[in-house]
Amino acid sequence: MTKPEQPFEEPWQAQAFALTVHLHDQGHFNWNEWADALSAQIHSGAERTYYNYWLCALEALIAAKGITTPQNLASTAEAWKHAAARTPHGQPITLSDNAKIP
């Protein structure tokens, strides 16, 4: 019996995919804009995995659309990194009350 193909290797990949679909469904961008953003990342010359291209495209597009700023993205990523480092394995990661999230 062959193992079914899994589209996501990591939970964050599924979350990035779901967030992209959600933001599209909310009218923040159309699929042509998304395809252009993803294509720009893939053809940027940077060596990344597919879902890292995806994440970079999503970050660039939401910043370009004014949904948040690159600075807010960076500070939130840093807050998550620190939260993950202090969270015991198997426990949900939560941000402290003073973490800044857009």
Image (cartoon, rainbow, N blue to C red):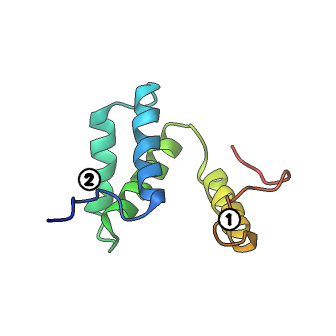
According to the picture, the residue beneath numbered tag 2 turns out to be 39
Q: Quadrant of the C terminus?
A: top right
Left of 62 or right of it: where is 72? right
Q: In which quarter of the image is residue 54?
A: bottom left
Observer-side mark, 1 or 2, equals 1
Q: Quadrant of residue 83?
A: bottom right
Q: Mark on residue 24?
A: none
Disc 1 residue type?
A: Glu
Q: Where is residue 21 in the image (x, y as percent from the top left)?
A: 39, 37
Left of 76 or right of it: where is 9? left
Which residue is the extreme one toward the right? 98
Q: Where is residue 80 in the image (x, y as percent from the top left)?
A: 67, 62
Residue drawn at 68 percent across, 65 percent down = 78
Left of 97 or right of it: where is 90? left
Which residue is the extreme one toward the left? 1
For the residues marked 1 and 2, what is the alpha-carbon distance in whole angstroms?
Answer: 26 Å
Of residues 60 and 31, the one drawn nearer to the viewer in this rendering: 31
Of residues 74 and 5, the one drawn nearer to the viewer in this rendering: 5
Disc 2 residue type?
A: Ser
Q: Where is residue 28 in the image (x, y as percent from the top left)?
A: 46, 30
Residue drawn at 26 percent across, 53 percent down = 39
Mark 1 vs 2, N-terminal side: 2
Q: Is residue 6 above or below residue 33?
A: below
Of residues 51 and 33, the one drawn nearer to the viewer in this rendering: 51
Q: Which type of secondary structure does the marked residue at label 2 adopt? A: helix
Q: How crowded is mark 2: few (under 14 residues within 10 Å), some or many (20 or more)?
A: some
Of residues 20 and 60, the one drawn nearer to the viewer in this rendering: 20
According to the picture, the residue beneath numbered tag 1 turns out to be 78
Q: Which type of secondary structure does the marked residue at label 1 adopt? A: helix
Residue drawn at 71 percent across, 47 percent down = 101
Q: How crowded is mark 1: few (under 14 residues within 10 Å), some or many (20 or more)?
A: some
Q: In which quarter of the image is the N terminus?
A: bottom left
